[in-house]
Image (cartoon, helix red, strand yellow):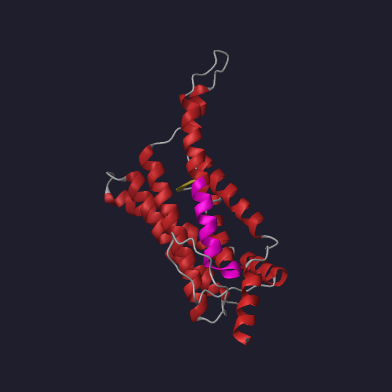
Amino acid sequence: MASLLSSAAAMKRDTRQYRYLDLLINIFVVILIVSNLIAPKFVEAGWFRFSAAQLLFPITYIFGDVFTEVYGYSASRRAIWTGFLGSVIMTAFGLFAIWLPPAPEFHDQKAFATIFGVVPRNVAGSLVAYCCGEFANSLTVAKMKLWTNGKHLWTRTVGSTIVGQAVDTTIVIVFIFWGQPLGIMFKLIVSGYLFKVVYEVLATPLTYLVVNFLKRTEGVDYFDRHTDFNPFAVKKEVPDYR
């Protein structure tokens, strides 16, 4: 009887509506889409050259840390696939809009095509890198939370970025710059990777503030002890709280 009551209570908590989760997922998707739009712009900073997206895209990994740390891996999986769908829709309709014949009075077709036009290999590389990197990031957070019993959040935020960004940066550079000299590809991977990891380390205090606020406000601290980590799983997860 006690076990039935415990299961019922768990299911009740699992089906409740979180106050901020949907809002955070929406913000996550917007940041992801905007970062894809501004990616072609390269910025000069002394000797360094970097995409404008590098100022924004690492924030998606911070969101991934927050989703997994507070709501669990299944919430992060939901956010990742929502972002993937949003990126695919943006790309498809961007290409469709370019294909549509411009009106005679529209004189910015070339500029429009520059912003929304994409190379298929670049799109494939970006989407594959995004999915692999985000899932590696979230999996690392979930596993490390169990290993540390929920303590030392900074080890998870930094450790997950070290793993996730290594996967993401390597895949996207190899896809986009395949055929270039290996030395150039290596330099791009290392410089982009180090920038993103340092970005995450500097953002750690902010991550602490957001995570602690959400745990306190939502009344949840999810542990993925019984989670199916298959990225394609759709079944309902059994909640496991502290």
Placement of the C terminus among the 4 image quadrants: bottom right
Query: Where residue 202 sits in the image (x, y, percent)?
Result: 57, 64
The vertical placement of 134 against 89, above or below, is below
Taking the spot 34% from the left edge, 47% from the top edge, the residue there is 175
Task: Identify which residue is drawn at 47% across, 59% down.
Answer: 134
Total number of numbered discs in the rendering: 0
Asked if 172 appears above or below 116 in the picture, the reply is below
Whether 227 is among the magenta residues is no
Q: Residue farthest to the bottom?
A: 2
Q: Residue furthest right?
A: 217
Residue 217: which quarter of the image?
Answer: bottom right
In the displayed orientation, state which residue is furthest to the front.
1
34 and 202: which is toward the camera? 34
Q: Residue at x 44, y 61 (%)?
A: 231
Q: Is residue 187 left or right of residue 33?
A: left
Whether residue 199 is visible: no
The secondary structure that dominates the magenta segment is helix
**Magenta span has 73?**
yes
Of residues 40 and 70, the one nearer the viewer is 70
Residue 88 in the image: above or below residue 198: above
| Image-based side of 37 in relation to 8, left or right | left
**Any part of residue 2 in sight:** yes
Q: Position of residue 1 (x, y in %)?
A: 62, 86
- Whole-percent x and y of residue 42? 48, 41
The residue depicted at 48 percent of the width and 57 percent of the height is 195
Most foreground residue, 26 or 46:
26
Residue 103, image x, y percentages: 55, 16
State the extent of the magenta-drawn residues as a range.
69-85
